[in-house]
Image: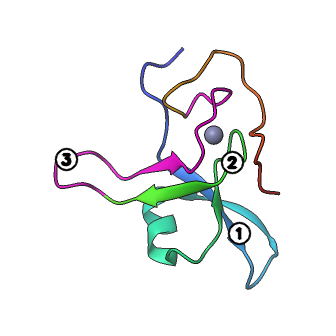
Amino acid sequence: MPMMPNNEDCEVWDAAQAQEWRLVRVEDALLLGREVRKRCPECHGRVRAHKLANNGMRAHIEHVAKHSGCSRGSNFSGRPSIHPLAVG
Ligand SMILES: [Zn+2]
């Protein structure tokens, strides 16, 4: 079990071309802007992308609604499950 969750990528909705979710690095998700839909690759919950912070925290994704069934979240229960508000 990794100590640090891997929060360096996320899925973005490609509305312009393929009409499907694409896995991208969080830095690339940030370049696409706020209006592009983003979700967690693991639980499919909606996420927000954060750029590198002044305090040195790396660019990362954060679940809009916390979910204990996701190892990328801050409150993982140890039992993975799909987010109750999953976006498909
Ligand atoms: Zn998740």
Q: Is residue 25 left or right of residue 20?
A: left
The residue under label 2 is which amino acid type? Answer: Gly
**Position in image of residue 53 (x %, y %):** 24, 54
Q: CA distance from mark 1 to mark 3?
A: 28 Å
Q: Amino acid at mark 1?
A: Trp
Residue indicated by mark 3: 56
Residue at the spot x=43%, y=19% of the render?
3
Q: Residue furthest bottom?
A: 16
Of callouts 1 and 2, the N-terminal one: 1
CB-based contact (under 8 Å), mark 1 and mark 3: no
Applied colour scheme: rainbow
Which mark is drawn over residue 13? 1
Task: Give neighbour class at mark 2: few <14, some 14-19, many 20+ (Cα, 10 Å).
Answer: many
How far apart are labels 3 and 2 at the CA level?
Answer: 26 Å
Look at the numbered disc 2 and say if its residue's Cβ is closer than 8 Å to ligand 1. yes
Identify the mark nearer the N-term, 3 or 2.
Answer: 2
Q: Which residue is mark 2?
A: 45
Is residue 38 in the magenta section? no
In the structure shown, which secondary structural element does the residue marked by tag 2 occupy?
loop
Is residue 60 magenta-colored?
A: yes
Q: Earlier in the sequence, mark 1 or mark 3?
A: 1
Q: Mark 3 packing: few (<14 Cα in 10 Å), some, or many (20+)?
A: few
- Numbered range of the magenta stretch: 52-72
Q: Nearer the viewer, mark 1 or mark 2?
A: 2
The C terminus, quarter of image: bottom right
